[in-house]
Amino acid sequence: MNRNVLILLSLLFFAGLLQAQPDYTIKGKVYTSIKAAMMQPDSVTRLKLRRKGLKEVPPEVMQFKNLKELDLTSNKISRIPADIGKLNQLEILRLGRNQIQVIGKEIGTLTNLKYLDLGKNQIQALPFEIGNLSNLEFLQIWGNEITLLPENIQKLSKLKYLDMRAILLTESEREDVLEQLPQTEVLISPGCNCGK
């Protein structure tokens, strides 16, 4: 295959990723620095700390008890702290494009979550507690190493959309995912003969 065809296929793939992403927004002032947010911690509902070079979730974030949207996209975060459960008002959590390898069971305490973006990390499995996210509508796990979903993901009755593209799945793994979530729009890459 010549170079131009490869470039075109890559562009089409990434355009598809961008085009198909649903969005969920919350109204309110957006804070883009911890310092500014700390001046009025009780009024902070939206915090966007994209591309800040963060290696961890800043501990100060846990003080924003009314936080509804937390965006930590495109940092260098490798783990989600156990006290993430303190943010029980969260509706949107964006952790895409980091270096997260493990999602702890604490994620299951965020029962107000509607939108969870874990795309483009190094995650190999979702915890069983993901099934506790009873209000979850959008789940993005594309570009990870997840090949099996926990059984109780079927409890997510409000889940409208699951993005699992750019994950190498065998045909049977692919069929299992689609079978688990018959009422959900699942974006999934074609099955492969990956030698698993």
Image (cartoon, rainbow, N blue to C red):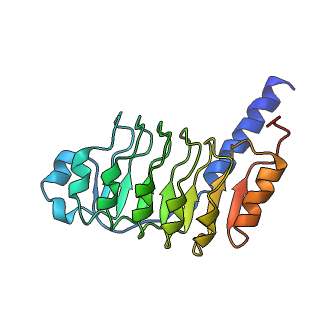
Above or below residue 26? Residue 176 is above
Question: In percent of the image, x 55 and y 47: which residue is there?
Answer: 119
Which quadrant is home to the C terminus?
top right
Instruction: Name the residue rendered at 57%, 74% in the picture.
Output: 158
Identify which residue, 108 or 42, lies in the foreground: 108
Q: Is residue 118 left or right of residue 55?
A: right
Identity of the residue furthest to the left in this view: 39
In the displayed structure, 179 sits above or below 49; it is below
Q: Quadrant of the N terminus?
A: top right
Judged from this view, the residue extending furthest toward the top is 3
Q: Residue at x 36, y 64 (%)?
A: 90
Q: Nearer the viewer, residue 5 or 92?
A: 92
Q: Could you tell me residue 89's position as x and y percent?
A: 33, 68
Q: Is residue 146 left or right of residue 104?
A: right
Find residue 167 and report its horizontal and vertical position in percent.
69, 43
Work out whether residue 1 or residue 77 is closer to the camera in this orientation and state it: 77
Q: Could you tell me which residue is drawn at 58 percent across and 47 percent down?
A: 125
The quarter of the picture where residue 169 lies is: top right
Residue 33 x, y percent position in the rendering = 24, 46
Number of marks in picture: 0
Quadrant housing residue 193: top right
